[in-house]
Amino acid sequence: MRAATYAGTPQLYGSQPPLALVWDVSRAQSAFMPNVLTPSHGESPEARKVGETLGRMRQHSEAEVSQPLAAVGSDFESLISGIDAEPVQDGVTHPAEAAVDEFIRKHGSWSALSNLQALDGGRAASLLRLLGRSSKVEGIARLVAIAIGLASSSVEVRDAAAQAAELWEDPASVPLLLKHRESTPWLAAYIERVANMIAG
Amino acid sequence: VTAVFTRKFNRAKWDPAPDLDAGEIAADAVTADLRTTGNELSFWDFPASSEAELKETVLALATAQDRLDKLDVAWIEQAAVLTEGLTVQPTLHHAMTPVESLKERHVDVTRLDMERLGRIAKLIQGAVAANQCRRFLKKEVLAVIVAAVQAGRVASAALKDDVRKAVEADLKSSK
């Protein structure tokens, strides 16, 4: 159940997730699973993959988590220092964008996503926005990033998740966006517009 | 019709912060969105806040940017700025936009200290609360720039690489 759990996406999930992500993903799964996988709305292969991934991740107990945060800790701290140097602004290249790509190249998308939970809302939002700008985040990792971000209690992080979805324009993210129940009206309107834009 | 000053901002940072009391402005919002240069803060001067004028703000801002993203624009009433005793000066030379016709729209609120910057933050906070803000999707931003290029208001060569490539790709695909 350990390594085999991620056998379907070994290129992205070559290592076990830290416990922090298990908790976060549990929330994401709670938020999305019942809706995303409702047959009446269609069950795309991508949505099914996200659901399966989140579900499998949720099954992990603390004992099953083998990779501690410390494994990428110093690199992650450096990345966050770079992000802290400047606010992430629309239309402006951030000096940490290259560092984000390098972190993903070295540790994988999974490590970047798993450490989101360890950050406060502002930093998590900044990282998620920069992940949205990265072409290194691919496939199901994008959907998991959006799902985790939208499940956050921080409006800034949920907004960042929607922005990442807007930049990636992945049709597979539309069910996630449409089924999200957003409590902040302006953000709900944005998420709906992004979903409609992607759906064409 | 109310004359306004418009400015780019980050909508999410101006939502009430859970760790602050009601009505308090998050320092993160100020440090991220109200970054001054030479104790001045940049705005765009428009006679109204119609969709057309907001798109002109988007055009002024996005044509100077490195990349295409969604864009949040807020507007504050000019009368309120003057009531607060803030000093506003036209500053064409600070306008970064390559759109010549918009440079004259650029103004700076000048002589800012902490207290006066706080007044601006209050005005922005009030504007957000009154829904005096608009989010343009990335594709809407692109459409605004493409229309300006097609109208000859700005040359695609004047845009930064990523923006220029996106504009030229859009123009090519629409032929």
Image (cartoon, coloured by chain):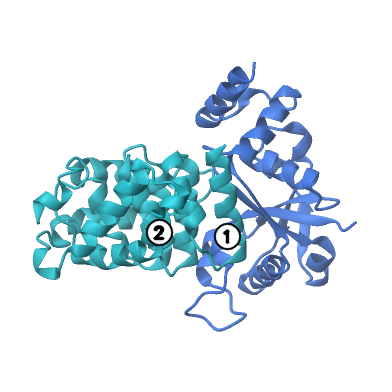
Residue B99 visible in rendering: yes
- In this view, B111 is above or below A194: below
Left or right: B131 as drawn, with respect to A44: right
Residue bearing mark 1: A188
Q: Determine the secondary structure under disc 2.
A: helix
Front tag of 1 and 2: 1
Q: Which chain is cyan?
A: A
Residue A78 visible in rendering: no
Residue drawn at 18 percent across, 58 percent down: A17
Q: Which chain is blue?
A: B
Q: Nearer the viewer, residue A37 or B80?
A: A37
Query: Could you tell me residue A118's position as x and y percent?
Result: 29, 66
Residue bearing mark 2: A149
Residue drawn at 24 percent across, 50 percent down: A110
Separation of marks 1 and 2 at Cα, in angstroms:
14 Å
Rendering quarter of residue B83: bottom right
